[in-house]
Image (spheres, coloured by chain):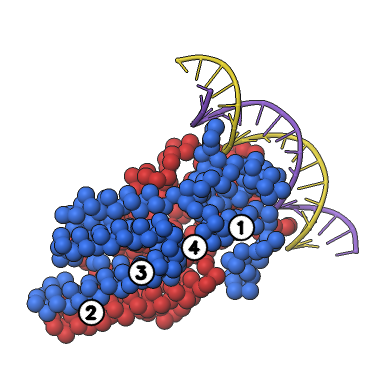
Chain colours: A red, B blue, C yellow, D purple
Amino acid sequence: MRLHPAMKSSERKVIPFRTATMSTQIVAQVRDALFAKELRPGDFLGTEKELAERFAVSRIVARDALRTLEAQGVVEIKVGSGGGARIAEDHARLRELIAQAERRINDVAGFTRASREFHLAVAEASHNRVLVVQLISLQHVSWPAHNPTLTPSVARRVLDAHKELASLIEMRDGAGAGRLMDEHVKMIGARRVAEHRDKRRENPACC
Amino acid sequence: MRLHPAMKSSERKVIPFRTATMSTQIVAQVRDALFAKELRPGDFLGTEKELAERFAVSRIVARDALRTLEAQGVVEIKVGSGGGARIAEDHARLRELIAQAERRINDVAGFTRASREFHLAVAEASHNRVLVVQLISLQHVSWPAHNPTLTPSVARRVLDAHKELASLIEMRDGAGAGRLMDEHVKMIGARRVAEHRDKRRENPACC
DNA sequence: GAAAATTTGTTCGTATGTATC
DNA sequence: CGATACATACGAACAAATTTT
């Protein structure tokens, strides 16, 4: 069975190998469907009972899978009538865009596009329109789509940074991850814009 | 039973309120103990059965909590005799990343990557999300992947600082490690920006 | 290498609290 | 308010995997 990219042992030697359980297989299938856009944010995933029937497992197994998906921020669960598991909004989209970029790590144009969309999704997730503008300018400066010098290693590093960013947002830290995120983006934007301005001043023909 | 600060509903209107379950309370207690350094990486947390007895809940509830903690990367679970849940080890990861960087001290790309991962691992180990944000922004801004100006002597100095940091964190000198980390990051940032400025001054066409 | 002990993985049945209609 | 649907929770038991003996 195919492992989730995040489980690749090459980059995380610390994590011991653990045989694929039924619940982990369900988790993988849900995430694969999410990345393949068969599942979209907001979609109803099902109740414990439904999932158990669909995957032909007991309710406890479905429950295990839902606990994992919930902790990963992939689904949100409601109790009571009409309840069940639904694909979470922000996290799901970020993860999806990261997966896209990962699949196109050797395709410069595709990788750049996916990364740009990721930045915008982050900004949208923060619900700050000022940030969107700043990020667009940031992308123009540091992510020229026509730049053919994007090596696989560079792509990999950017990808990792994005993953960390997504994880950070997933934390939904009570201390104010949202506010910190804003400052983070503003800082990048300001710096990049300043550098760009200086660069253009010295070499008007650039970019 | 005391609730985890992250569960306060007052600050998160988006997330639908969900009654505190037994398993989430166990998760909160474990994470609190980890943050308060009552639990350290590598510590044995217990088996499902033991946890169920300790918290006076059923095995299913303990299992739910472990699924969540596992998905959050807080614990690692092994089956079989001598198995059970242990607090995820991060010292080993720090040491491994330092060793990686040391092996690639003449390989700019490899060294840069290992150092970057080290920074993040340190931030994660210190459980300080402010630092995580600072480090991510630092990487975005001042660690351009195509920067070829990383000299061996600079690399050596960074490496030594990393070793010092690792030692501090292992000593569990929380306050000291946090402050030192801050200064370390600021130093790198300043240095990088200065180098970049100097480089552009010498060769305006660069970058 | 084989047997035993330990632990997680999995199933079924049942009861209870809670949200929706 | 009552009925319904659902997640949460408990208990007992067997299967599978892993370590220890």
Disc 3 target residue: B180
* The one of C19 and A43 positioned closer to us in this rendering: C19
Q: Position of residue A9 (x, y in %)?
A: 37, 43
Position of residue B170 measured from the top left corner of the image (x, y, whole percent) = 40, 56
In this rendering, the label closer to the viewer, 2 or 3:
3
Chain of the residue that carries numbered disc 1 in the rendered image: B
Q: Which chain is disc 3 placed on? A: B
Is the same chain shared between marks 1 and 3?
A: yes
Report the residue at 21% width, 49% height from top. B103
Q: Find residue B29 and name its label.
A: 1
Q: Is residue D16 above or below residue A2?
A: above
Q: Are marks 2 and 3 in contact (CB under 8 Å)?
A: no
Do marks 2 and 3 both belong to one polypeptide chain?
Answer: no
Question: Residue A5 appears at what percent x and percent y?
Answer: 39, 48
A130 displayed left or right of B16? left
Please tell me which residue lies in front, A135 or A68: A68
Report the Cα–Cα distance between label 1 and label 2. Answer: 48 Å
Q: Secondary structure at mark 3?
A: helix
Amino acid carrying mark 3 in the image: Leu
CB under 8 Å between discs 1 and 2: no
Between B196 and B42, which is closer to the camera in this rendering? B42
